[in-house]
Image: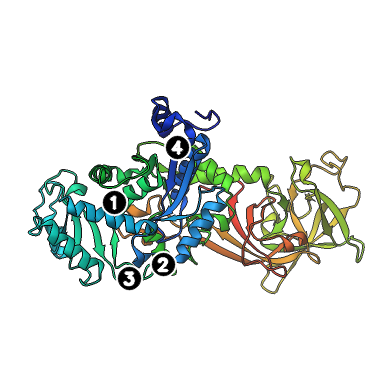
Amino acid sequence: MTEHTDTPTHFIRQIIDKDLAEGKHGGKGEHIVTRFPPEPNGYLHIGHAKSIFLNFGLAEQYRGACTLRFDDTNPAKESEEYVASIKADVSWLGCQWAGEVRYASDYFDVIHACAVSLIRAGQAYVDSQTPEQIAANRGDFTHPGTDSPFRERSAEENLALFEAMRQGELDEGTAVLRAKIDMRAPNMNMRDPVLYRIRKVRHHQTGDTWCIYPMYDFTHPISDAIEGITHSLCTLEFEAHRPLYDWVLDKLEGLQSFPSRPRQYEFARLNLNYTVTSKRKLKLLVDEGHVQGWDDPRMPTISGLRRRGYTPAAIRRFCDMVGVARADSVVDMGMLESAIRDDLNQHAPRAMCVLRPLKLVIENWPAGEVAELEAPMHPQNEAMGTREIPMSGEVFIDREDFQEEANKKFKRLVLGDRVRLRYGYVVRATDVIRDDQGEIVEVRCTYDPDTLGKNPENDEGQGKLRGVIHWVSAAQGVPCEVRLYDRLFTAANPDREEAGFLSCMNPSSLQVLEGAVAEPSLAVAPAESRFQFEREGYFCVDRDSQPERPVFNLTVGLRESF
């Protein structure tokens, strides 16, 4: 068995270890096979990341294999766009599936043959009730269901009707194939569940070959068995479906030949506060224009997190922090933000960007002179090197870094006092210029040419500096757009809002600053480059960025804001 002491232990690993110790799967970790089976009806979200890292992580730890299989059994809601996005997200997260990408539709012939076998064995029948009648006769948790009047059709009649369904001779909603189990079963999933339904919709993989499609609960165990899956991992909502999973495989034993007999195990899904992870609700946000697409940086989708500046390493670290458990819980958004903050603090190069510019004119600066100041790319990582920052007689500072008067707690520039321009000189504010409305539009100052690279904290007669502020040269700085993102919802649990989850959308979730100015080197930074804008936060170059006007997305602040 493969040693894997460097990864977190959880109950699923304990199950696998026990299986191998008992000689199952040949007692060899390389025989462990997992799968990630997304439905291509939307983009992946942060909850899927937990499942991805669990399934692919186990395969990696045991030196086994993990397949990527699309559960494409409902073509009315699926598309190639979703297929492409899912493959891109899994690859971006650093996971490599075994062999070719699989599709449940690859197995439609086998699944259809399994259905025919069950019909012949008297384990399935075609029900001609309407959908409304089927629902009404199903009963509820306190009342047993009622047998369909078509439940005792002969195998021959059922085979003929199922073939008529297959040939498109019956309309949607007029017939389904159901398993014959027990309409009085306490588990609602075992009350003669539907195995096939008619959908006269073109399929993105099989075209018009099929007009009947198997249900997930029928497709899932058969696909697992075909692929030789040893441990089929699902989230807890599928726990009540496990008896049906086993029923399908038990009834097909002896009727079909499969490489292995898979087992299903359930773990708690990832529930994150201040967001929603239902693909139906996420699609609603996109379709109704509440966000600017599936990859909007406010969305909890993998592509949205990627565009916002999150890294695969941070997302994986977050999933490790959450862990794998049997009981559902809600994880605080702050944990995810902490994971990316820790990652970027170590790896993101530093830069300066003034979000709300106020001009600072250095009156004693030599006319026309431009100085090239040296600054580290990262203060704790010399291997990242240095960068050159141009400085001229006019620079921009942040408007919030200046006050005419302030108490000692204000550690920035005050009229008549001194601060250091980061990596540059010490300046003293001497005057302000106002516009016709009385607003300060310019601060005048002088600089001390002997303070570059020196610590003037104890200069005799000078007094202590108030602080250090960031800046950008007015002449060489690059105008840019900065998008400040906040949480999409104001309520910790949007799903529990009486007026609906849309009622608590945060109107301030996006603020666009169009007048920001950045270091000139940032103009050519490629999309998805990540930086710490010193004293501001961590930012990512957006895909909309252009050299003449870079665009930056706020990833996360320097410290928790909630």
Which residue sits at x=70%, y=58%? 353
Residue 54 visible, this orientation: yes
Q: Are marks 2 and 4 in contact (CB under 8 Å)?
A: no
The residue under label 1 is 217
**Disc 3 crowd, CA 10 A, few/some/many (<14, 14-19, 20+):** some
Choose the circle earlier in sequence order: 2 or 4: 4
Element class at badge 2: loop
Any mark on residue 257, and which? none
The amino acid pointed to by label 4 is Ile
C-alpha span from label 3 to label 1 = 20 Å
Any mark on residue 32, and which? 4
C-alpha span from label 1 to label 2 = 21 Å
Residue 307 location (% of width, % of height): 57, 58
The residue under label 2 is 204
221 or 321: which is nearer to us?
221
Which residue sits at x=75%, y=57%? 471
Residue 495 location (% of width, % of height): 34, 54
The residue under label 3 is 201
**Disc 1 crowd, CA 10 A, few/some/many (<14, 14-19, 20+):** some
The amino acid pointed to by label 2 is His
